[in-house]
Image: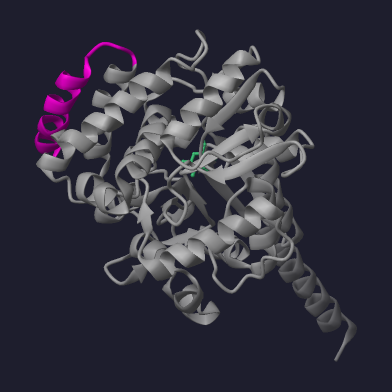
Amino acid sequence: MNMRIIAQLAAGAALIALAAGSAKAAEEVEVLHWWTAGGEAAALNVLKENLAKEGVSWKDMPVAGGSGVQAMTALRARVTSGDPPTAVQMLGFDIRDWAEQGVVGNLDDLAEKQGWGKVIPEALQAFSKYDGHWIAAPVNVHSTNWLWLNKAAFDKAGGKEPANIDELIALLDKFKEQGLTPLAHGGQPWQDGTLWESVVLSTGGMDFYKKAVIDLDPAALSGDQMKKVFDTMTKLRTYFDPNFSGRDWNLSTALVIEGKAGAQQMGDWSKGEWLRANKKPGTDFVCMRFPGTQGNVLFNADQFVMFDVGDAKRDAQMKLASAVEDPAFQIAFNTVKGSVPARTDVPGDQFDDCGKKGIKDVADAAKAGTLVGSLAHGYAQPGAIKEAVFDVITQHLNGQIDTATALKRLPEAVAAAK
Ligand code: BGC
């Protein structure tokens, strides 16, 4: 081989290397999400860092607003303009809606290679797959029927976990005597709905939740049992502070962390805020199932829906999906986020006591048939019905309509939204 050919070959090889290098450097995922609270952002950082190690850079598209209300509006604008992000944090029926539009990608090859079908619970797969094809990578399992207590205030109040609504009310009275806001609640429709569904479950048990919220039985939506639910909401309202209206969920969590409030009813993303404030379960705070709901789990699961972004961006997109289902990531992320792993084969030994309880509760409930979708977080009904129920709950909680009117309106609003 003469020197000229060798030089040409070397130059060619250098060009190829350069091209490969720049292709690698250009790999990027754009992710739309609503994880903007301290604990949420800390959890998401785990994913950003893992992808960076694989040479994939992260273009952040955060849209603040609990439970993703505003994020879904932002998404619509992006998809309508023909430029969807690589992946979008999404819940339940919203995932189906986008799949029906024919704008999502396909994860079948990766899911098959990594055996997702064997380790992701059926209840999640029902939303991660559409028409038999994987379209989303589930990140976690959260659940909504939790109560979070300030440990010092709780100890002062006797330290006995309330077993039902009456005992909860007695505990809230004791918090009041201590000069605290008994129940830290943020008045936003999705938060009102999150409280309401725990009260539904506690008041009537899982059969009633299924009849009212899953089957949308008009008699269950307007009968005596539902009257008890709305009466309980009216009573709980008396334990809020005057500034509750419109307050973000994490600011309510902060009130409990700072010892200004005694308790918060909220999903287990609340734990992320406690951990972020360097607080420990069992020492600084107590996690328990909402009184009267032990044995039942109202789940919501964050999933990254992969949009159809074309071949050029597909490799990075698959790296993201693969990183999400990596068992080590499932541990690193969920121990910070407050959720439990989306995979059933991930060991729980690195989780704190609340996390261990969460993992056990979800597994037990799955076996017992009491792992059921949360209405407030999109896993029980399509968006239109969810919103219709929120309207009634929020108006009632704010005293705009009385219980009799709420009972009349609830089945009507649901029927109109169907
Ligand atoms: C999501 C959580 C999130 C919470 C508050 C829920 O719907 O599943 O991941 O932390 O909303 O924004």
Residue 415, quarter of picture: top left
Residue 295's spot in the image, x, y percent? 45, 57
Q: Is residue 373 magenta?
A: no
Q: Residue furthest top?
A: 242
Choose between 254 and 34: the one closer to the eye. Answer: 254
Give percent across and percent down for residue 301.
Answer: 46, 53
The image quadrant where one finds the N terminus is: bottom right
Q: Looking at the picture, tell me which residue is in the foreground, 104 or 358.
A: 358
* Residue located farthest toward the front when viewing the structure as drawn: 158
The boundaries of the magenta stretch are 398-418
Residue at left offset 21%, top offset 20%:
403
- In the image, taking residue 236 as reference, residue 24 lies left or right, namely right
The verdict on residue 399 being magenta is yes
Q: How is the image coloured?
A: one colour
Figure check: 413 above or below 297: above
The quadrant in which residue 325 appears is: bottom right
Most frequent secondary structure within the magenta stretch: helix
Q: Which residue shows up at 29% across the image and 44% down it?
A: 204
Residue 105 location, x and y as percent? 40, 61
- Relative to 115, say whether 36 is above or below: above
The quadrant of the picture occupied by the C terminus is top left
Q: Does 135 sit left or right of 332 as displayed?
A: left
> Residue 412 versus residue 2: which sits nearer the camera?
412
Q: Residue at point 77% right, 40% down?
A: 283
Using the rendered image of the protein, determine whether residue 213 is visible from the camera's viewpoint: yes
- Toward the viewer: 138 or 149? 149
Q: Position of residue 321 (x, y in %)?
A: 55, 62
